[in-house]
Amino acid sequence: QVQLAESGGDSVQDGGSLKLSCVASGSTWRYCMGWFRQAPGKEREWVARIDTIGLTYYDESVEGRFTISKDNSKKTSYLQMKNLKPEDTAMYYCAAGVGCAWDYWGQGTQVVVSS
């Protein structure tokens, strides 16, 4: 069992930056790590993922603005977000799983981007 805890959410202005962190209770080296988000009134959507060999993938809405990374020694995944837009406002969730099956989820961290 792995527990995930996100942090780093905040309120920022349009064009601002934030870095989210996701700390795992157990080793992360064998897990695919991902970030999802859910805006009010909308379904949860996938944002980015990083697999066990460090390959990264992004939704087209964040490509070029967000960067996912992980530090296995710190059991932590990161989501660096730049050039934030009001439409990025959402609760952001960290997820982990073998083969990107998303078996484990965090409680979320809120990001608000105002214009």
Image (cartoon, rainbow, N blue to C red):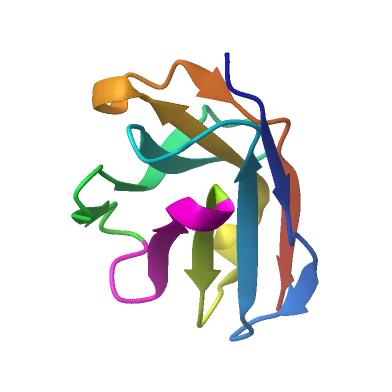
For the residue pair 43 and 111, the one nearer the viewer reads as: 111
Number of numbered discs present?
A: 0
For the residue pair 44 and 55, the one nearer the viewer reads as: 55
Q: Is residue 8 above or below residue 59?
A: below
Q: Identify the residue shown where x is 50% and y is 35%.
A: 27
Residue 65 at x, y = what percent? 39, 75
Q: Identify the residue shown where x is 45% and y is 51%.
A: 72
What is the quadrant of residue 33 in the picture? top left
Residue with the most extreme front position: 73
Residue with the most extreme right position: 11
Q: Is residue 4 above or below residue 81?
A: above
Q: Is residue 65 left or right of residue 41?
A: left
Q: Identify the residue shown where x is 57% and y is 13%.
A: 1
Magenta-drawn stretch contains 72: yes
What is the quadrant of residue 13 in the picture? bottom right
For the residue pair 34 and 26, the one nearer the viewer reads as: 26
Q: Identify the residue shown where x is 41% and y is 22%.
A: 102
Identify the image quadrant of the C terminus. bottom right
Q: Is residue 44 above or below residue 88?
A: above
Residue 107 at x, y = what percent? 73, 30
Q: Is residue 52 left or right of residue 92?
A: left
Residue 74 at x, y = what percent? 57, 55
Residue 93 at x, y = what percent? 60, 39
Q: Is residue 36 left or right of residue 1?
A: left
Magenta-drawn stretch contains 70: yes
Which region of the structure is painted magenta?
62-74
